[in-house]
Image (tube, helix red, strand yellow):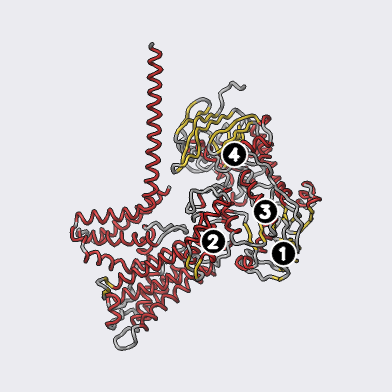
Amino acid sequence: MNTEVPILKMEHISKSFGGVPVLIDVNFELSRSQVHAVTGENGAGKSTLMKILAGVHHADSGRILLNGNEVNVRSPKSAISMGIAMIQQELNPVREMTVSENIFLGKEPCFGSTGVVNRNKQRQLARNLFQTLDFPLDPDAKMGSLSVAEMQMAEIAKAVSYNSSFIIMDEPTSALSGREVEKLFKIIDSLKSRDIAVIYISHKLDEIFRIADVITVLRDGKYIETRPVSEFDHNTLVRLMVGREIHEMFPKTNVSAGPITVAVEGLTKAGVFTDVNVQAHRGEVLGIAGLMGAGRTELVETIFGLRQADAGTVRVNGVELKIKSPADAMEHGIALITDDRKLKGLNLTASVRDNITLVNLKSYSRYGQILRLKKENEVVDTEIEKFRIKTRNRYQPVGTLSGGTQQKVILSKWLLANPDIIIFDEPTRGIDVGAKAEIYGIISNLAQHGKTIVVVSSEMQEIIGLSDRVIVLYHGRVTAEFQRNEFDQESIIRAAMGK
Amino acid sequence: MGSEEETKLLESTSAKVEKARSARAQRRLRALTVGSFLSRYGIYFAFVFLVIVLAIISPPFFTASNIMDILRQISVIGILAVGQTVVIITAGIDLSVGSILALSAVMAASFAHPGQYPLIVPLIVGLAGGLICGTINGVLIAKSRLAPFIVTLGMMTAARGMALVYTSGRPVFNLSNGYDTIGTGYLFGIPLPVVIFIIVILFGVFTMRYTRFGRYVYAVGGNEMAAKASGINTDRILIAVYILQGVLAGVAGIVLSSRVMSASPSLGEGYELDAIAAAVIGGTSLMGGIGTISGTVVGALIIGVMNNGLDMLNVSSYWQLIVKGAIIVFAVFLDKKTKG
């Protein structure tokens, strides 16, 4: 075993929020130039543990040691001064400032002690930093003009400029495309070779196995296990994370596709998608694959009436629709479970109840206006039970729930309206394995019950595991179509890249 | 022997420490639940506390007649504040209510001279004035996607201008007895303005808690995009909300002009800010999605009670403004603190 003092040690960390324990006596140790994955389901406490380390939250008890010395991380500022740098899941740079200004924010190089910023020196320092890290960034570019991956690079450069001996990355790939993920892994490798350790928070198993040296598993706020990656396999890791066996991730049963329910013909939106022809059948799961920006989300949002097409028609059961708004689409039995929970899916300040019944509120109203609260409450309580929504009660604000639980609230909200055609846009983005399996189960079950299902996803496993048929979008055009018996990850990816 | 004692001592201290720790944890838990209780009902406690303090230091404060006075004083602001709460819950704001009040008042009053028209005519005219202004606000905000602050700032200036043009800048006097009764009369010993205020409160509470429309208002304010994606016609909700506020400003204009028995085009200047203050003190979030009518009513009561109490204590009205300003900021500060 390694006898040298770990560069970071967290001992017996406990923390509760509003009386609810989030971390219970958690231990964590990080060695020099190690990539240490911290994993667990949503709500396992990964992010909270790291936020304590980064000074965002304070532990109720326990201590933190850096290189064997106990430290008191009072604030994010004091964390930074100790060389603890965290790349947040949702980056929050000053978009109107340049890259170099962002990197040196709060520690601008000045002319002597005048307080006047030496812009040339700042630019030069940033450029040197990018050179050593081999980042293709322009120090003078506006931060807001960068892609998410580039912003992340800038944040990593910033962390390196603090002379940190380790960098915390919270779900760093959640907004990256496949190629960008590869690049990030290269960056992590190069950090390692520069003696910088990385704490990698993620619940994406393939990534963890790719990049980590050591894995620590948390579950329900408790420390479960730390082991070198070589001692884990896929199944043990899932079992440790979930605390139970997941027998089948994709409970796929063969269903015979029924008649065509949705027929999209020549649908075009200038610059977004062109001449899209798609049919979906009753009882079938149609997967829509493609890279980010291929026009998938725009396509389904157009079918649902959130956007307007320039040309083309949408028919449902043979009838041509004039869909101008989501309300029109819903009238024809179409539901769209949107991709961005926080932006388009939920009212985070409102309660579980108010979110669940929002789509379907009319059925709980007398004279179309006056709410029948008792009936509504009953229905909501059944839904909470049916979907196993982890909430204190129906009045808890949705914003305080974990990602997977939020996604179940959205599912419940739409399924209550009993739609016939259900479009899922990235149904499992940012949620954990356990909740994923549950959602896959729900989707398959819906198809079996004669619904028409469309799934848009960037996760190849999901597309292949769920779909009966897959179409691939590339630059707004359908480039390929595959039946289930001819699925093959490589050809789907190739079609998605336009090859 | 010594080492044994040491161990015992150690054990007992560690037990003590453990005990103290769990006691502390429990206390914290209790503090937290008390805290969350306070944050939910804190404004109500603050109000009760204020009333008790004033009742002790100034005995005439807690008399039926004085309480009626307070209610009458806050009724106009209160009616506006109910509408303002609904607007703010949509993440909007309405700066034009004071001016709409004045325009409605002068329009109504000009049809309320004795022996001219039946009483219903000035009432309809006054409400129509508010309705038209509210509709313009709502349509501009919902359809042209202009910021509510800008649209209603424009309306605030323009409606005041219209009131001045309509009256040539002179107050409208000589109103019928019937009209004056609205502001000066009583029902079962309760001043009519207070009765109207109470009806508006009940209407507001019912609308926001027990109707689909109310639920949609919260949905639009909490996340307009999600509301739209859920099939809600968000434009229609927004327009309706500003119309509601316009009509309530019309009600307030009729009540105020009938109470002072004249309608000056400068009526209600600055009332929009008092209405916003009442809503904000009552816990309505300017970010939208959060707020209650009952909170706002208490917010209005706090302002009214404070003014009245300070009057009784012979504090000059200049100082009262300073106190009011401090209360607004302090209330929001407390709200933020307790809700973390």
Chain letter of the residue carrying label 4: A
Find residue B135 and report its horizontal and vertical position in percent.
47, 74
The reply to whether dot 2 and dot 1 touch (C-beta < 8 Å) is no
> Residue furthest toward the bottom?
B115
How far apart are the two marked residues, 3 and 4, measured between alpha carbons? 27 Å
Q: In terms of secondary structure, where does tag 4 sit?
A: loop
Is residue A393 visible in the rendered image? The answer is yes
For label 3, the crowd category at 10 Å Cα-Cα, with few meaning under 14, some 14 to 19 and many 20 or more, is some
How far apart are the two marked residues, 3 and 1, measured between alpha carbons? 19 Å
Q: What residue is shown at x 19% (from left), y 60% (from top)?
A: B314
Q: Which mark is first along the chain, 4 or 3?
A: 4
State the residue position of label 2.
A358
Q: In terms of secondary structure, where does tag 1 sit?
A: strand
Q: In terms of secondary structure, where does tag 3 sit?
A: helix
State the residue position of label 4.
A40
Q: Nearer the viewer, residue A285 or B279?
A: A285
For label 4, the crowd category at 10 Å Cα-Cα, with few meaning under 14, some 14 to 19 and many 20 or more, is many
Identity, as a three-letter code, of the amino acid under mark 1: Val
State the residue position of label 1.
A262
For label 1, the crowd category at 10 Å Cα-Cα, with few meaning under 14, some 14 to 19 and many 20 or more, is many
Chain letter of the residue carrying label 3: A
Chain letter of the residue carrying label 1: A
State the residue position of label 3.
A445
Observer-side mark, 3 or 2, equals: 3
Q: Is residue A94 above or below residue A31?
A: below
Q: What residue is shown at x 69% (from left), y 44% (from top)?
A: A248
Identity, as a three-letter code, of the amino acid under mark 4: Gly
- Left or right relative to A233: residue B323: left
Is residue A125 visible in the rendered image? The answer is no
Q: Is residue A300 above or below residue A46?
A: below
